[in-house]
Amino acid sequence: MNALSLDWELMLDNLLRIGAAYVLAFPVAWEREKAEKSAGLRTFPLVAVASAGFVLTGARLADSTPESVSRVIQGLMTGIGFIGGGTILKAKNDRVHGTATAASVWSTGAIGAAAALGRFEIAILLSAITFATLHLLKPLKRSINGEHEPGPEKKEPEAAREREDRDGEDRSD
């Protein structure tokens, strides 16, 4: 095969794996976007797609071994940790925000890696568990912390306070 010809069967396989990473990251992205977090609809699918791309590239090298693919995944997870770390913010009141978003970014990277390796059962489970943790455990967290869901009349002032706490944080993920 020369450098300019394409293996269409391999292209379709790659599209399936990268597409699965994108689709499975979307519920997490939707939840974070709906909650108006610093990462959302664009960030999470891009992390999953990039993760899948790196793993596919590493796995498809002519002399790739399980050890070399493992090293690609190790580097990938470390790099994603830095991206996630960027979502963690300390507010003026010394409260830390963004740890769930950071963990979700990391989980989305794992979704992409699993999809790239054809381990769709793992990718599906990661997507479902991450979404359920973010979405369904929110009322439990509020209850434990003694917080109440604000009524419609209180949501706008609360959102304004959160914007002030972010000190000009760029939400243009």
Image (spheres, rainbow, N blue to C red):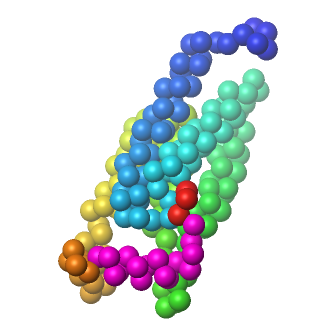
Q: In the rendered structure, does residue 136 fall within the stretch colored magenta? A: no
The magenta region covers 155-170
Q: Residue at x 75, y 23 (%)?
A: 62
Percent from the top left, x then y, of residue 64? 72, 30
Can residue 93 be seen by looking at this rendering? yes
Tell me which secondary structure the magenta stretch mostly adopts.
Answer: helix
Count of numbered tags = 0
Quarter assignment of residue 89: bottom right
Q: Is residue 151 above or below residue 63?
A: below
Q: Is residue 26 above or below residue 99?
A: above
In this rendering, would 34 be left or right of 123?
Answer: left
Q: Residue at x 55, y 45 (%)?
A: 46
Can residue 143 be seen by looking at this rendering? no
Quarter assignment of residue 132: bottom left
Q: Residue at x 69, y 44 (%)?
A: 72
Give the residue at the far right of this rendering: 3
Quadrant position of the C terminus in the picture? bottom right
Q: In the rendered structure, does residue 166 fall within the stretch colored magenta? A: yes
Quarter assignment of residue 121: top left
Quadrant position of the N terminus in the picture? top right
- Looking at the picture, tell me which residue is in the foreground, 103 or 161: 161
Percent from the top left, x then y, of residue 51? 60, 43
- Looking at the picture, tell me which residue is in the foreground, 168 or 63: 168
Percent from the top left, x then y, of residue 77? 62, 53
Q: Is residue 5 above or below residue 90?
A: above
- Looking at the picture, tell me which residue is in the foreground, 158 or 39: 158
- Looking at the picture, tell me which residue is in the foreground, 166 or 117: 166
Percent from the top left, x then y, of residue 104? 47, 59
Q: Residue at x 55, y 59 (%)?
A: 172
